[in-house]
Image (cartoon, helix red, strand yellow):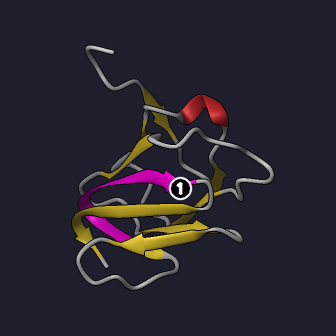
Amino acid sequence: FRAIPQNSQSAAYTLVIADSGKHIYHPSADTTARTWTIPANSSVAFPIGTAITFINDTSAGAITIAITTDTLVLAGAGTTGSRTLASNGIATATKVTSTRWIISGVNLT
């Protein structure tokens, strides 16, 4: 792609295979906190190397980036589990093994 296609979400959302290489966008008009979930490899087998970016616009409610049975690792800290993306935040998750993702970004805890 010469651009990163957008999937705008203002609800709880579970990623699908078509989200590979896209950015999931939470618009500023939606001030409600939401949970977006990376599904288990056993239900959606994203290829290793898949990158998905999450963007939480100005004034938008916090996004919890959750994962089911696989592992989500915060780059640098090495801690695992769900992450919170505050407004004005951007983070990219990259699949590095069949059941392991690494995520990094700004306004990500």
Asked if residue 25 shows in the view, the reply is no
Q: Amino acid at mark 1?
A: Thr
Residue 94: % across, % down:
41, 51
x and y percentages locating residue 6 in the rendered image: 42, 29
Q: Which residues are magenta?
A: 84-97
Q: Is residue 14 left or right of residue 109?
A: right
Q: Secondary structure at mark 1?
A: strand
Does residue 80 appear in this view?
A: yes
- Check residue 74 for magenta coloring: no
User: Would you name the residue on which mark 1 appears?
Assistant: 97
Name which residue lies at 47% across and 82% down: 80
Say which quarter of the image contains residue 73.
bottom left
Q: Nearer the viewer, residue 96 or 86?
A: 96
Query: Left of 1 or right of it: where is 8?
Result: right
The residue at the point 71 percent across, 53 percent down is 41
Residue depicted at 48% across the width and 61% down the height = 101
